[in-house]
Amino acid sequence: MGVSRGGFSSRFGFIMAAAGSAVGLGNIWGFPTQTASNGGAAFVLVYLVLAFCLAYPAFMAELLIGRYGQANAVSSMQKIARNTWQKRFGFVVGFGGIICAALILSFYSIIAGWMMSYAIEPLARLAGFAGAADWLINHSLIRNILFTAFFMGLTIFIIRRGVEEGIEKWSKRLMPMLIGLLILLIIYVFTLDGAREGFNAYLNPDISRVFEPDLLISALGQAFFSLSLGTSVMIIYGSYIAKKENLVTLGAQVTLIDVSIAFLAGLLIIPAMYVAQAQGVAIFAEDGSLISGSNLVFTVLPALFSGMGDVGLFVAFGFFVLMSIAALTSSISMLEGPVSYVVERHDTPREKATTFIGLGILVLSILIVINLEWMLDFVATLSTQYGQPIIAMLCCVFAGWVWHRSDILSEIKQGNEHVEHSLFWKIWPWYTKFVCPTAIGLVFWHSL
Ligand code: TRP
């Protein structure tokens, strides 16, 4: 191998990086829209339970595999495997995750590009360039390609610098900014008319909906997407953590941050929707269902911002910068998956590997941009609704059935001397062996 791998230099650095991967458009855009279209607080409740009971154990499986292997996803899995079949199985799961991360990045960067163009628009308007401002928020092929490339360029720039100087340094800068911006925006929206109604819709659960199958499936899918599971990313981030760290607690902290930010984002978006409604913007379609998806972020919210007058320009700027930051700390982790694989398995310098893989994924993104109507949805469904749950499930199967129990236990014990008395120690091994794969499988089966 001969290449120095690098690693996170501090606990805080790891938490910010892993939370940065987890906190993305899924939290700030996906979670609130899912909540609003699935019965408000009932969805929040189910989401919280599933995130801690199913997503967290699966998340721990990936982190533990990575820290044990101290290598990219494929090599880490293969280090655990003991015979040829198991090694093949490890390859399929590890490499599948890497492909999945690349596919997600290919469409994620397009949406992130939109966020950036919407962030620059208010600046152009303030500076008096009305024509440029209009161009920035009108979907055109050329704008889409330019901004996708711009966003991918930023991602490549950070990943070229490696773990400590790239991922860690930028996550430590960007994540606190994101949290600060989010809180400022929430406070501001709360002072507006209509916010209270949104607040109530968000926090009063309609308990009768809690067991609706659709709601359960959406909540589980959201929890897996949000923790970036099934994409090899957490295996790689796990491999950059020092053996002296207590992984069980670190994993729990990251899950907690991820869930809290999703919750906070709901506190911003849902009241903002009701504020928009109070100002006469339509937020429900004619059949009473919520206008969600891209329309919510790119039409409802901008309509709200422009109704605010000049302040709206600043609020719009803040909001779309928030979205762009969230997207960037996620996209760097997606690129790290394939890059670490090529660097370690094919002895390629990091800079070169990053540039080539990044540009390769950009080509795919441009292909998607050109065929936006069908391809965006297709790639998103393939990678997030099929790829992620299947690979996350196989990771649990791998940890539960292939990995020697004594090796797992000694890995858990690293950096955590007293773990033997904890609930995690008693429950997690059989939980990952039986409960996680079955539950993920059931929910996945049902979603078909
Ligand atoms: N967790 C990210 C979000 O909430 C999205 C995501 C899904 C992701 N899979 C990933 C990020 C893999 C990094 C790697 O938006």
Image: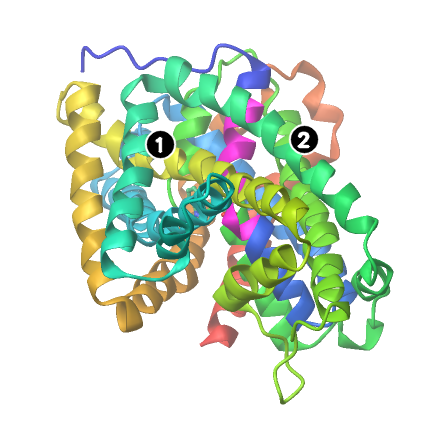
Left or right: residue 345 versus residue 270 is: left
Query: Mark 1 = which residue?
Result: 80
Q: Does the magenta stretch include residue 258?
A: no
At label 1, counting other C-alpha atoms closer than 10 Å, the crowd grade (few under 14, some 14-19, many 20 or more) is many
Q: Residue at x 53, y 27 (%)?
A: 174
Q: Where is residue 324 in the image (x, y as percent from the top left)?
A: 47, 41
Q: Earlier in the sequence, mark 2 or mark 1?
A: 1
Q: Residue at x 53, y 45 (%)?
A: 320
Give the label, 2 or 1, closer to the camera.
2
Query: Mark 2 = which residue?
Result: 180
The residue lying furthest to the front in this view is 128
Q: Which residue is drawn at 14% across and 33% down?
A: 356
Q: Which amino acid does the dot numbered 2 rest on?
A: Gly
Q: Is residue 15 magenta?
A: yes
The quadrant of the rendering that contains the C terminus is bottom left
Q: Where is residue 306 in the image (x, y as percent from the top left)?
A: 61, 57
Identify the magenta region.
Answer: 14-27
The residue tagged with tag 1: helix, strand or loop? helix
Mark 2, ligand 1, within 8 Å: the answer is: no
Label 2 – label 1 distance at C-alpha? 41 Å
